[in-house]
Image: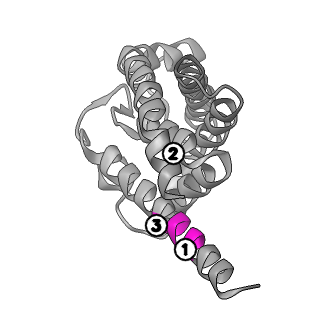
Amino acid sequence: MTITATRSANHTRTLQLVQIAMFAALMAIGANISAFLVIGGVPITLQTFFAILAGILLGSRLGAIAMAVYAFIGLAGLPVFAEFSGGMDTLISPTFGFIVSFVFVAFITGMIAQKFPSRTGFIAAAIVGTAVNYLIGTNWMYAAYKLWFAAPEGFSYKMAWAWMAVPLPKDLILAVLAGIFGFRLKPLIRKFQ
């Protein structure tokens, strides 16, 4: 391996580490921009937006790694989750499923965006990512309330999904915006890789 090839490989690895760290930080910011707006037990955040962007801009593998780094930072105790929470006790939180979902959101969104590298493809990838977020997060929340957390009076599967109707319009709009932003930003990211 030549010196130029070694420098190029080191540059690429360094850039990837910076991108992973940047998206983990953006997730912490997105989690707490509206940290005190909680509807039906679900904090309203911008995390899905940043998870989608991570998948589109970094690709499926690096995007998923960035989301996993974010989750591990929070589980280690830093207050990076919604409402400035963190720590291992978050694992039993009804909303931890949404944090788990971000890894899958970034991975799936990145895969779809890679296969369909157009504005429409990126928007479709973002909407699918939002659906993945809702499926994993809402089902985790339902299971948590039914199995190990104190459920509100009259809690049902239908009620869990009804709670998700409140942030859905915001998340769909942000998904479309993430797809558009991702499409516009992707050429810039490629230029520096």
- Relative placement, left or right, of 62 versus 47 is right
The numbered disc on residue 18 is 3
- Relative placement, left or right, of 158 versus 49 is right
Indicate the amino acid at tag 3: Val
Of tags 1 and 2, the one toward the viewer is 1
Indicate the amino acid at tag 2: Ala
The image shows residue 174 at horizontal and vertical percentages of: 38, 25
Residue 155 visible in the current orientation: no
Q: Is residue 8 magenta?
A: no
Mark 3, secondary structure of its residue: helix
Of tags 1 and 3, the one toward the viewer is 1
Q: Residue at x 54, y 56 (%)?
A: 66
Q: Which residue is mark 2?
A: 54
Q: Which residue is mark 1?
A: 11
User: Which quadrant of the figure contains the C terminus?
Assistant: bottom right
The image shows residue 43 at horizontal and vertical percentages of: 35, 35
Real-space Cα separation, disc 1 to disc 3, in angstroms: 11 Å
Residue numbers of the magenta segment = 11-18
Indicate the amino acid at tag 1: His
Q: Is residue 161 above or below residue 27?
A: above
Q: Earlier in the sequence, mark 3 or mark 2?
A: 3
